Amino acid sequence: MILGEAFIYLMKVNIALVVFYLFYRLLFSRDTFFMIRRGCLWMILGMSFIYPLILFSFGEEQKEAIQQTVVRYAVNLLPEVKVTPEGQSVAITGWDIVRWGYCTIVCLLLARIVIQIYSIVRLVRKGERAFCCSVPVIVLPGQVTPFSFFKWIFVNPSGYDTRDLQEIMVHEKTHADQYHSLDVMVSEVLCSFFWMNPAAWLLKREIRRNLEFLADKRVVHSGFDRRAYQYHLLRLSHPLAAAQIVNKFNVTPLKKRIMMMNKKRTSRMGLIKYALLVPVLGLLVLSSNVQAIVHQDNGTMLLAGQDSVLVKGVVVDSNDVPLDGATVIVKGTNVGVSTDGKGEFAIKVKTGETLIFSYVGKANQFIPVKDAKKLHVKMLTENVVLDELVVVGYSGDAEEADVFMVVEDMPQFMGEDGNVMKFLAKRIRYPQEAQKSKIQGKVFVQFIISKTGEAKDFKVIKSVHPLLDREAIRVLQLMPNWKPGTQRGKPVSVSYTVPINFQLQ
């Protein structure tokens, strides 16, 4: 279950990286707001990881409505039985190979970053310290491209004339002062974990380019001649670099950097387009919660489509004395409730359905439901003549013709210290074939506790797979007899529903 949720989370992050990259390339990649673009790229990375964690939640009443779409008549719903594998060996599947292969490449890419950091640390420890243009640097041996890594600047002063060296130092000091290496490290780690996603590599390229734009802008604004600086960049063609995770002075493509240095400054009106990130994020959040929205809408549609209303009221006798234990049943169903000590009740029904009120020694009352209102039902002493006798035949046992959902004394489980869930949990087993096939889910089984206390008429009302359905039925059939429920002192049959959750670890 955890792996499944992690997979969904990573898929959502990958989708966001693609969407945000396309959005960035379309709107932001051509302006000159380099510092704002840097913040925008940080926001893109942060929002890509955060938005899947923004989950919609609904009120308890809406959650109840959603649950009713699964099992509407599960009034006597027993606690859930959770079933997990007991350490049986499971064959390695193709998905396992893909998962381990993916993780192996991630580890290799992360190890590559660690090795490069180690090589830089070695340069720091063994390198010669010097001051270049009043800035402390670490002297590089040979013809190595100047670079910076966090606060460290690496350069070989002997390889450049004074003016070129000043330009290099301003450029690399900009990287160091603004902590550009942090952006580079984050982009490298991002590519390590999402190496299969082209958008991750493309975002890394955009991050590196924008950092160079920022450093070039600082050099030009420091008083150096723009054209001379551009020729300087073109003259530097050292292919050798200490590591890939550093900010190098001369990086390709130079054409884009030179174009940006010569580009006319973007109007401040162009900042408005950055506000479009908000609706894009909103759409991603909505898409991430589409399942919850659909479930909520289904629950709402179920209730709205059926014109369901909550009916409350009180049941009294001819002297307005509240009747405790009066039965309120929806006509044509087994859905019903009993009144409490104050004679009050509450039941959810569809508009147009009829409620049947019954009590020992009183005439039944039939009240159609037109809207949500509080009913005041007066039960009169039964003194009526039956107009007709309706005989209904049942294909099953006659004693099970009337199955109650709510009775005065509910059935009681007699085994395992009275704990039916403990009894079931000890005896249920996860089918090995279902484990190998990665089959999991929640099975809902309905059964009847008869007048004699026997558990019978087991029926799967929400199936997952025949393997899991059979195991759920098997373990329920092992239950010993219950103490039967009673209504007005007489044993009656009562229906129960139990959810059995088969969950892979």
Image (cartoon, rainbow, N blue to C red):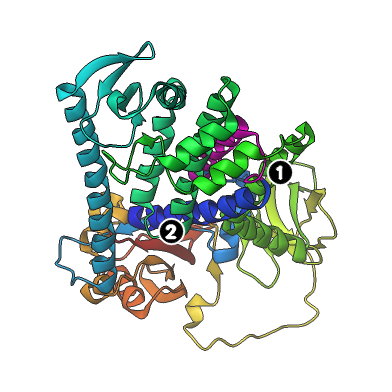
Residues 361 and 216: in front is 216
Mark 2 and mark 1: Cα distance apart in space: 24 Å
Residue at screen point 71% across, 69% down: 331
The image shows residue 486, relative to residue 143, as above or below, that is: below
Pointer 2 local density, CA inside 10 Å: few below 14, some 14–19, many at least 20: some
For the residue labelled by badge 2, is the local secondary structure a helix, a strand or a loop? loop
Q: What element carries label 1?
A: helix
Image point 18% across, 60% down: which residue? Answer: 86
The residue segment tinted magenta is 28-51
Q: Estimate the x, y position of residue 60 in percent, counting from the top left.
A: 60, 45
Q: Residue 495: x percent and y percent?
A: 48, 66
Q: Is the magenta stretch mostly helix, strand or loop?
A: helix
Callout 1 amino acid: Leu
Which residue corresponds to the image point at 43% horizontal and 70% vertical from the top-left? Answer: 447
Image quadrant where residue 299 sits: bottom right
Instruction: Bin the neighbour count of mark 1 within 10 Å (Cα to Cα): few under 14, some 14-19, many 20 and up.
Output: few
Residue nearest the observer in this picture, 126 or 334: 126
Q: In this view, does 307 lie to the left or right of 274?
A: right
Query: Where is the C terminus found, in terms of image quarters?
Result: bottom left
Task: Indicate which disc residue 197 carries.
Answer: 2
Q: Quadrant of residue 337?
A: bottom right
- Left or right side of 344 for 41: left
User: Which residue is label 1 attached to?
Assistant: 276
Q: Which of 187 and 168 is in front in this view?
A: 168
Q: Residue 187, can we see it?
A: yes
Amino acid bearing label 2: Asn
Q: Nearer the viewer, residue 326 or 256?
A: 256
Q: Where is residue 227 in the image (x, y as percent from the top left)?
A: 58, 34
